[in-house]
Image: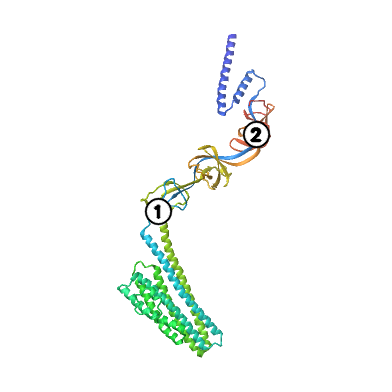
Amino acid sequence: MKTITKNKTYKKILFGVVAIISLVVVASSFSAARGHNFLLANILSSVSDNDKTVSNKETVAVQTRKISLENIDQSISASAVTGPLNNVKVSPKMTGKVVGVYFEEGDWVNAGQTIIQLEQDRILRTAYNNAQTNLINTRASMNQDIKAAEVAVKAAEVALANARKSLNDSSATNEQVIANAYTNALNNARAAVLTGTNAIIAATELQYKYFGIGSDQNAVRIAEKKSKAIYLLLGKSNAGRWASQFITPLDGGVKGQVEDATANFSQEKIDQILTDIVPALQSVEDLLAEVRTDLDWKRGVLPSEKSALDTARIGIESSITGLSNSKQAIVSAKLGKITGNDAAQSAYESAKKQLESAQANLASIKERAKLQIAAAQGQLDSIQAQLDNTTIAAPISGVVSRKYIEVGEMAMAGSPVAELVDTSSIKIELSLTEFDVGKIFVGQEAEVRLRAYPNEKFVGKVYYVSSVADPVSKKFPVKIRLENSDGKIKAGMVADVKIITDKQKDVLIIPKSAVFKEEGVEKVYVAENSKVKIKTVKTEAIDQDRLKVVEGLSAGEEIIVNGNYNLKEGELVTVKN
């Protein structure tokens, strides 16, 4: 019987040893996963208590940490790859053959520097020269027309002033009124001669440019009509093939009559002028019409040249109308000997209408001049823009990272010919969560460490914070700029970025693992005199592992950080730090 009892006792001891070894193995595995050995100590203690071999009182092995006031920096960390702040692919605006490449890969180029030259079309260059000449001619022609119209306006202003004076001065004699009418007529005749002379010169320029002095029908007709116009207006026969420089000095014909009447005023001379000048102006108008008609059959005629002839014809017609009004004014003035003040009033109204007509004509010519010059300038600018597109300039200053074209190849519009990078400043682009991006603002400093230079720290600044998340990653792009004037940092280096978002002093910090919740209330275990004390606390998250104590604890208290599993208020603990 004793042997049986003894065997049973051995079996119990053996079973107990096996159970203890099993618990040791399980506890070791569990503690390895959590990095602690305190559960093992508790299990062993518990087994010892059960066997009544250690002590009659139960204790729990724990590890504590005395909390103190600390200074903390809250930050956001992320990794990214460096890149150039500016990276531009240069493309031509037009297709063309490359005749010059002025860089190699790795060269530094400045913004605005010519890097590639395309071949310039000869037709385009000729068109540019023609457009430039056309602009010069248009301006000169319109200036002449404006000057002639301004002379007419001034003459009309003088006539109106004289008419007003005559009307207001009741003592003025009828003979003076007549003299004023003749003076006005003479002034109008002088302006008309100038208009007609300018028109002949304009026609002559086009005659030599497009018809020459040959024997074809067009050239002959133009020469005949020009000869007649010069003879009547300027008093020189057989001048149909004369160049402009020989026409301007002529002073015969109606022009000579006007100069004579100006030097030796005579009503009879002015009457003769009014009789002779209209046919002379009509012959000029016939010349303009002939040239204008023949130009319609010529190729390459500029629209502004045709428009200039039309403007000249309008000026001639206006002059004829003004002379007709002057002649009528003289008739009215002579009738004033009978009608008295009615003649003065009529002269005033006529002069007023003449001034209004002259002013309207001047305004019309100026407006046409503005439009014609703008059209000519626009044509020149358009061709200049096409020529400019053959020169490809660097849009930014930087290093040529890629070269896609060689001399002799065709550059296609919109296709890259070179790639430029500016690494004087480096860009680092991060992707942050909605929780983190709210703590970032433009101008904020960022600490950057490059794995290529592990012992150096670089400081950059946030220059862009996106207000829209990426639709795929749901993260917000944030860009940081690093100055890199020495070129030490290369594009493509791995960067570890740290952005400090908050700094606090004298803060109580505890591990997140030291806090547990009961019914939503945060609590911690505190070791006081080898006993457990449960305290209610309020905390704020610092990061994933640390909490800031807002209330409930004081500096110097020892909180249980390991072994804090289902402890009871007042329970005995053994501190094993």
Residue that carries the numbered disc 2 in the rendered image? 523
Disc with the residue nearer the chain's start (1 vs 2): 1
| Residue placed most toward the observer, 118 or 88 | 118
Report x, y in % for residue 58: 66, 23
Is the N terminus in the top left, top right, bottom left or bottom right quadrant?
Answer: top right
Report x, y in % for residue 320: 43, 80
Task: For label 1, count other residues whose C-alpha is less than 10 Å away and answer few (under 14), some (14-19) or many (20+).
Answer: many
Badge 1 marks a residue whose secondary structure is strand
Tell me if residue 326 can be seen: no
Report x, y in % for residue 446: 56, 42
Determine whether 258 is above or below 79 in the image. below
| Residue placed most toward the observer, 5 or 166 | 166
Determine whether 394 is above or below 305 in the image. above
Residue that carries the numbered disc 1 in the rendered image? 117
Which quarter of the figure has residue 530? top right
Is the C terminus in the top left, top right, bottom left or bottom right quadrant?
Answer: top right
Q: Amino acid at mark 2?
A: Lys
Which quarter of the figure has residue 459? top right
Tell me if residue 312 can be seen: yes
Residue drawn at the location 44% of the way across and 73% of the way down: 145
Which quarter of the figure has residue 66? top right
| Residue placed most toward the observer, 185 or 556 | 185
Colouring method of the image: rainbow
Task: For label 2, count other residues whose C-alpha is less than 10 Å away and answer few (under 14), some (14-19) or many (20+).
Answer: some
Report x, y in % for residue 386: 41, 58
Q: Amino acid at mark 1?
A: Gln
